[in-house]
Structure formats: structure tokens, C-alpha cells
Image (spheres, rainbow, N blue to C red):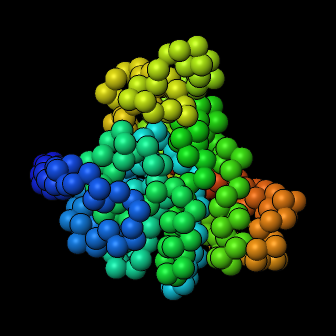
Amino acid sequence: MQASVRFGSALKVVFDLWLQATLAPSNAFNGWSLEDRNPQVIEQLTPMLDWLYYDYFRAQTSGWENVPSSGRLLLIGSHNGGLAAPDMYMIMHDWYQRFGVDRPTYALMDSTIWQAMPGLGRLATQMGALRTHPKMAYAALKRDATLLIYPGGAQDVFRPYSERHKIYFHGRRGFIKLALQTETPIVPVISWGAHSTLIVLADFYPQIQKLHQQGLPWLFGIDPEVFPVYLGLPWGIAFGPLPNIPFPVQVHTRVCPPIMFKRYGRKAAQDAAYVDECYYHVKTSMQQALDQLRQDVSNCVQQKSGWGDR
């Protein structure tokens, strides 16, 4: 009963903030300014994050001792769970609990959000969302802020369920060049469970793209980059990157030790072979950490069920 009351109260706050953002001028909170981040709005959203964290996803986390107490950072993650992206919000909750809402923290967000769902985009801006554009990333790091990036984007968050065990960046190396040019440590963040909050069966984007080339217009004039078919709430089965209500699956997150490279600077960022080397080092390190997290979760489940003693 108490959880239901907390949820109802928190949902009303979220709705009110979303409504205010929706009614804001079209040129407000558009992801092009660092000044739009509002710690007071984040504090108002904390009860909803608390409910999601403790009551809905029953999140568990580890590794936060690996985050330096000051200085700029690149938090690099692998996205899960469709547009709801529950692991991202669980990580945000942990960050605010440990470092407060005033430590400057931003996240890059696909620019189409402001076009497709302007109210959500403007509200996310007040939480620290920035357009996925190099100038915004550099601006945040120039202020010694923490910047959260999910390089795999839509292709990662909607990757098939059969690939839920894999770290997937869609081959994007921009975050490596950013780290090298700004001499910024990379702190990987991984999660397990969030990709089971919906079941992505397959991505039919190549087929839909061919139809578009033959004259089929994109909905709202937006190239979705993915066209998943998934099982999830509230649709049952959904076609395309529709918003979803995640299943209440337990989510586990882990923060890994910082990664530093041997060389930094503009020349290092322009060395394609070196960028590839750094890219695969980060990807391999995160894959090993994800494999270990999966094993740790499995061992914990076995111990609780009593199988670990047999």
C-alpha cells in the first residue's frame, strides 16, 4: 500500500513537470545549453527514481568506489531495454545518491527525441540531457563535468534479446576520440537484467529502409534508425521503436575501474589504428566485466535458492 501511495504521488510530480516542459516555448530546453540543467527539477524527480529503484526494479549495484570524487569523467555504458532504458535511470539514481544533484553531470541524448517527443526532451534537458553533438560534449568536459554516453544508441538499446549478453557500440568510435582529445578517463558502467524488461525479437530496419527508398515516408519525417519487433507492455507485440512499459525485472549495475590510455592529444585521436586499439580495449574490458557480473548474479541466485550448497 505504501509503495502504491509513493508511486501515485511521484507520478503526479512527473506529470506536472512534463506538462510544464511541454508548454514551454519551442526554443526552450532544447539541449543546446549547459545552463538548462536544473538541480531542483532533479530533486523533484527523486521520489519517482526511488520508487523505480527500490520497489519496481529492486536494483542492486556495485563498484561506485571506482568513481573519482572530482574532475571530468566519461561514463560509457551499453544501453538496454528499449526507449524506457531502465538501467540508465538506475545508474542516475545511484549517482545522485552518492554525489548529490549539484555535481555537474550531463548525458548525450539522440536529437530526434526533441522532435518526436518535445515534452520529454525538454524535461530531460533539465535533468542534464544534451544534444548528441561534438560541441556539446566538449563544452561539458571543458567544465570538468561528468558526461554519460551510450555509444551504441538506438541500435544498442533495441538489439535482439539473443544478443543481450553482448556489449554493442555499433562500431562508433567518437567517444574514444573525445577521450583522447580531452585527456578524460573513461569509467565503464554495465548492467544486467534491463534487456529482459522487453523481448526484442528482431530488427527489420534494413527491410523498412528499402521500402523508404522506394517511396514509403518515415513517420513524422524521422528516420528511426531501427525497426524492432518486440514483446512488451502495453502492446503485447510492437512494431517499430515504440515507447514501452518495462517488465519489473531486477536490474543489476556495476561501475568498473577507470580506463586510461597510453597516449592522448590530437595526434592520438587522429591515429586511426590507435583509436581502434583503444576502442577494442574498452569494448573487451566491458565485455569481461559484463560476463563477470552475469556470473556473480547467477552465483547469488543459486546461493539464495540453496543450490550453492549442493
Q: Quick one: 196 or 25, which is closer to the camera?
A: 25
The picture quadrant where one finds residue 77 is bottom right
Which residue is found at the position 71% from the left and 65% from the top? 177
Please state the horizontal and vertical placement of residue 115, each as a whole percent of the image: 37, 42
* Number of numbered callouts drawn: 0
Viewer can see residue 303: no
Please state the horizontal and vertical placement of residue 261, each as a whole percent of the image: 77, 74
Q: Is residue 232 above or below residue 137?
A: above
Q: Which residue is outermost to the bottom?
A: 70
Q: Is residue 250 above or below residue 89?
A: above
Q: Is residue 243 left or right of residue 14?
A: right
Q: Is residue 146 above or below residue 1?
A: below
Which residue is found at the position 37% from the left and 35% from the top? 243
Please state the horizontal and vertical placement of residue 122, each as a whole percent of the image: 30, 55
Q: Is residue 115 above or below residue 133?
A: above
Q: Which residue is outermost to the right?
A: 273
Q: Quick one: 236 or 242, which is closer to the camera?
A: 242
Please state the horizontal and vertical placement of residue 81, each as a whole percent of the image: 47, 41
Q: Is residue 128 left or right of residue 303?
A: left
Q: Is residue 218 left or right of residue 211?
A: left
Q: Quick one: 17 or 49, which is closer to the camera?
A: 17
Which residue is found at the position 44% from the left and 67% from the top? 106
Viewer can see residue 221: yes
Which residue is found at the position 50% from the left and 23% from the top? 229
Q: Is residue 239 left or right of residue 209?
A: left
